[in-house]
Amino acid sequence: MLFFGGVQMSKRNFFLMCAIVFLQGFVFYGPIATVYRQARGLSMYDIFLIESISLVLMLVLEIPWGWFADRFGYKPTLVISNFLFFLSKIIFYKAHSFGLFLLERVILALSISGISGCDIALLYASIDKRQSEKYFGMYEAASTLGFFLASLASTAIVGVSLDLAALFTVFPYGLAWILTFFFHEVECKAERKPALLSSLKYAFKDGPMLIFIIAVGLVTQVNHSATVFLNQLQYIKSGIDPRYFGIIMAGMQLLPVLSAKTYAITGKLGQRLTMRLLFGAIAASCFILSRTIHPATSVLLVAIIGASYSLTRPIILDIQNKSITTTDRATLLSIYSMIIDVVGAVLNPAIGRAADVSIETAFIVCGIIAAVSFILVNFYFNFSARRANYIKNGMQGESSKKCPV
């Protein structure tokens, strides 16, 4: 085994990956991203439209980047993708028009679609497979820690200048790109993949599951809109100084930790009731946000949306995985993810247009979307319960025929 500075090459890749995502977590403008864009001439519709275009591009570019990584290697893919990530931050700092902000998002889509999957593949090939959960947990924690620290620092930086928050973000991304040159390349052989057409047929044949995925897509977009973009407008409406957005955002970073306790809740209430309560809480919070101007209430309701969504994630992943009975699990999960992204791309402009009318209108629209999601989730669980009873009764009927009393 080769060594670098006393560290095994495989471990070197792991530490470099953690360092890179830690640095890329330093998005100092994150807590004021919406305010920053508005200050530079974008409307809320413009912001959400650009997000939709970015989502569509990522969907289109995912497969070509995967082929490139298999053909030329993980290291070259990550070097190029992280350079594009760095370049997007420079353009973001320089942008003062719709065109430049759109260019920044196009380059960002190129970058993220290249990094997506390739980073995990390199990481997995570089660690002890028996401890993969431990390593992946550390990897995710490194990214969260970076953004947590950036959110805290943002308060002081924004107090001086909004522009400084964007400028300071450029430097850690430049350093992260430089670190990618020190990766040790690992062997990456493309494995034979299942036929995409058959996977698509399987995914769209299961109507109830498709409805469930659409419901997830709806609530995912509501959570993203409320906790990333609309929250800042709500805070301003409530009289909260933008200097404190960083502290609030830092606190919000602790919410995903709650997902580790989802199993305890479902153990007592069951998945169906838990999902109904959490989806209902998201819808109710959106409607209340459309009517309140109280600062503490606003922060609390945004936190409820984020916490409720975090708690649903383990349930959603469990339902998705248990619904798959074929060998092409990864492909089907990717298809489900694509459907969720498509739903987001469709909804983004509508929410953005509503936000241009007023923040109240935007939250009403989000509340309606979350309510539709609540209805669809109920349909899924009701159908699943009927199907389970039908199968159970059918088995009992067969049993009584074989063993008549």
Image: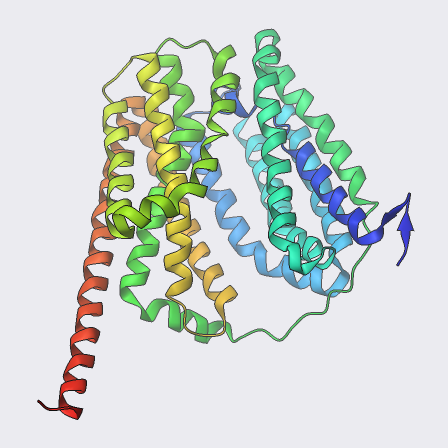
From what the image shows, is residue 212 above or below residue 204? above
At 61% across and 23% down in the image, what residue appears? 150
Q: Is 257 on the left or on the right of 237, as rendered?
A: right
Please tell me which residue lies in front, 174 or 400.
Answer: 400
Q: Is 207 on the left or on the right of 54, as rendered?
A: left
Across and down, in percent, residue 182 comes to 84, 45
Q: Is 52 on the left or on the right of 280, as rendered?
A: right
At 41% across and 72% down in the image, what residue appears? 325
Across and down, in percent, residue 177 comes to 76, 39
Please tell me which residue lies in front, 238 or 314.
Answer: 314
From what the image shows, is residue 173 above or below residue 41? below
- Display coloring: rainbow
At 37% across and 8% down in the image, what residue appears? 239
- Give the quarter of the image for residue 302: top left
Across and down, in percent, residue 56 comes to 49, 49
At 70% across and 64% down in the image, what residue appears? 70
From what the image shows, is residue 152 above or below residue 204? above
Q: Residue furthest front?
A: 405
Q: Is 374 on the left or on the right of 78, as rendered?
A: left
State whether residue 346 appears in this view.
Answer: no
- Give the quarter of the image for residue 339: bottom left
State whether residue 274 appears in this view.
Answer: yes
Q: In which quarter of the image is the C terminus?
A: bottom left
Q: In which quarter of the image is the N terminus?
A: bottom right
- Give the quarter of the image for residue 382: bottom left
Across and down, in percent, residue 134 comes to 62, 49
From what the image shows, is residue 95 above or below residue 324? above
